[in-house]
Image (cartoon, rainbow, N blue to C red):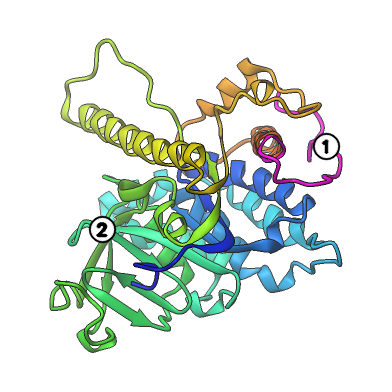
Amino acid sequence: MEDEGRQVEDGIALCLSGGGYRAMVFHVGALWRLNELGLLHRIARFSSVSGGSITAATLGLHWGELDFDAAGVARGFQAGLVTPIRSLASVTMDFGAIVGGLLWGGISARVQAVYRKHLFGDATLQDLPDSPRFVINATSLQSKVLWRFSKPYMADWRVGKVMKPRVPLAVAVGASSAFPPFLSPVRLKLRHEDFEPGSGADLQRPPFTTDVYLTDGGVYDNLGLETAWKRYGTVLVSDGGGDTPVDPVPARDWAKHTYRVLNVIDNQVGSLRKRQIVDGFQTGLRKGAYWSLRTDIQALGPAQPLPCEGRDCAELAATPTRLQAMAPRLQERLVNWGYAACDATIRSRGLAGNSPEARFPYPGGVA
């Protein structure tokens, strides 16, 4: 793979986590503040999973329309990202897809159809910009590693690389957000000869190259960290993932019990990735910043953080991990919280320079 064995570059990567619509909208707020700070146009790579991939792919598709001014601030940010994401956040995707899929089959196709209708149309990976690089991550159920979609190639380091793929954006995002068990798997039918000869480590053969089964990118890496951390010296991480609370009496029926087990696994995957980030920052291995739905911005110490009560932030963090329609005010609160968490963290890490004054995108803050 391209990133293996490379010397770390002096550039900025941004990781957008999974977490359904909650993460999708939270990331919009973070990107809003990064844009105001003039940092958005400096990002060399966007690496995303699941709900974060919805936001990232939308941003990538409209990158050429953002109209950056001399200070590097996108004048077309709201039209190119905020409006389409908030429009999708008003539509329930998962329930109809699951019920329809159970009755007539094709759950993943139904999810992809919603993405096409509301965000991507017939756009493919080739409609993403050459720069910055957008990497949409899914997990291979066959090889047990990341399958990454991007404009130059899509690849699984064990299976190999397909150059200049014309996979629809709706399919790539559908694979990245195929949360198990209901929305998973997404199946790709490919040709063995599409793969670059010798580009796979040990699995470049059918059926790995012809019948690909993918699930949510968060199963392997719920922060989208791997493809950014290996390559860039500065890594920003926006974490809109949920928290798995303790449960004194876990359910024993197979459906609820399976759901609980999946959440515990996801919680552990996230904990390991967060530990990697914290250790990397503390040891000087990487520069950057990490913010999440549970960031205590009052404890970070930047001058005049935006007013965010802990109970309001905790309520937002408890928003279910669903692709379920959100009330307009909940969307605004999540955008505001992503904005405030990003602002406080970036300034506390000394990455903002002479930053313009922070103001909530929507009146009312996070309350």
Comparing 305 with 332, the one in front is 305
**Viewer can see residue 117:** yes
- Give the residues in magenta: 346-367
- Quarter the N terminus occupies: bottom left
**CA distance separating discs 1 and 2:** 41 Å
Amino acid at dot 1: Arg
In the image, farthest residue toward the front? 283
Secondary structure of the residue carrying numbered label 1: loop
Is 125 situated above or below 246?
below
- The spot of residue 128 in percent (x, y) is 56, 74
* Numbered label attached to residue 302: none
> Could you tell whether 121 is left or right of 152 in the image?
right
Whether residue 346 sits left or right of residue 1 in the image: it is: right
Any magenta on residue 357? yes
Picture quadrant of residue 66: bottom right
334 lies left or right of 302: left
**Magenta segment includes 336:** no
Which residue lies at the image location 25% right of the left edge and 27% below the top edge? 256
Residues 233 and 144: in front is 233
Mark identifier at residue 145: 2
